[in-house]
Image: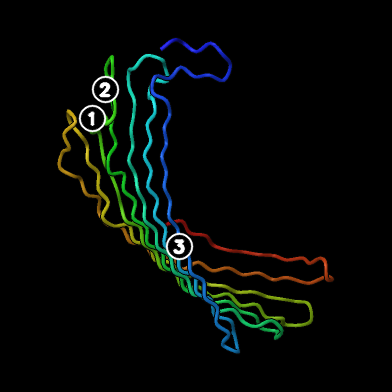
């Protein structure tokens, strides 16, 4: 390939190619229980992608990479919300998350000239991530225009079935499996807010965060 000489052009023997397909389905349900509104949100999503690109970013075919990946995600949430009006307002819910990711084939070409796709096998990896959470949050108008809020969330994370495979001479070697990891945390939050008028308020807030 001839070297690029124009602004915005890149010396690249392997044109960037990215093919992506995503299917997502969501179901939302609402039920009026009288004392509160109950919502259910269900989602299923599946993503599949394939990409090719140069690793050396030159017009000489030295090295290129191909990746085949897919991911499946399922989520479910139930939410209970109080009706507007009373001094006590609250939200409570439960959330479930299940995601399986898989980089099933990573191929690398090398040499001059480098082979064309499919490139020799280099690696593969994947893992399952699951989480469940229970949470609640309540606000009470203690006196006119003064609103203290307290909330609590319990989260449990589970990283499972992690694996990694390397290729030697394009031949997959035995998989290395990662240990399963489980973590649980309770995270609180507190807020106190004073409503100055219909357009402004002042508040102080403290919360504890958590990253799985």
Question: Mark 2 and mark 1: span between their CA atoms?
Answer: 8 Å
Of the two numbered discs 1 and 3 on the same chain, state the one appearing first in sequence.
3
| Side (left or right) of 187 relative to 116 | right
Q: Which residue is mark 2?
A: 115
Q: Nearer the viewer, residue 158 or 107?
A: 107
**Residue displayed at 25% across by 54% down:** 179
Question: Mark 2 and mark 3: span between their CA atoms?
Answer: 39 Å
Choose mark 1 or mark 3, whichever is in front: 3
- Determine whether label 2 and label 1 are within 8 Å by CB: yes
Name the image quarter holding residue 52: top left
- Residue 79, percent across and down? 53, 75
Crowd around label 2: few <14 · some 14–19 · many ≥20 (10 Å) = some
Q: Which residue is mark 3?
A: 25
The C terminus - image quarter: bottom left
Indicate whether 29 appears above or below 118.
Answer: below
Q: Which residue is mark 1?
A: 120
Q: Nearer the viewer, residue 32 or 132?
A: 32
Question: Mark 1 and mark 3: span between their CA atoms?
Answer: 35 Å
- Determine whether label 2 and label 3 are within 8 Å by CB: no
Of the two numbered discs 2 and 3 on the same chain, state the one appearing first in sequence.
3
Mark 1 secondary-structure assignment = loop
Q: Is residue 88 visible?
A: yes
| Side (left or right) of 3 relative to 38 | left
**Residue displayed at 25% across by 48% down:** 163
- Residue 196, percent across and down? 83, 70
Mark 2 secondary-structure assignment = loop
Choose mark 2 or mark 1, whichever is in front: 2
Name the image quarter holding residue 190: bottom right
């Amino acid at each position: 390939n001839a070297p690029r000489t124009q602004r915005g052009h890149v010396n690249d023997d392997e044109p960037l190619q990215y093919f992506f397909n995503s299917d997502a389905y969501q179901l939302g349900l609402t039920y009026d229980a009288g004392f509160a509104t109950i919502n259910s949100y269900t989602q299923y999503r599946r993503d599949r992608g394939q990409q090719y690109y140069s690793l050396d970013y030159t017009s000489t075919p030295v090295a290129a990479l191909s990746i085949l990946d897919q991911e499946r995600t399922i989520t479910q949430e139930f939410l209970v919300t109080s009706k507007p009006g009373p001094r006590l307002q609250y939200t409570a819910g439960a959330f479930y998350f299940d995601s399986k990711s898989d980089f099933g084939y990573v191929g690398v070409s090398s040499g001059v000239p480098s082979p064309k796709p499919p490139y020799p096998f280099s690696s593969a990896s994947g893992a399952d991530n699951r989480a469940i959470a229970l949470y609640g949050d309540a606000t009470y108008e203690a006196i006119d225009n003064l609103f203290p809020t307290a909330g609590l969330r319990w989260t449990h994370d589970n990283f499972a079935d992690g694996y990694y495979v390397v290729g030697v001479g394009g031949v997959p070697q035995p998989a290395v499996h990662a240990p399963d990891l489980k973590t649980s945390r309770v995270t609180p939050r507190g807020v106190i807010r004073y409503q100055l008028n219909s357009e402004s308020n002042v508040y102080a807030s403290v919360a504890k965060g958590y990253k799985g």
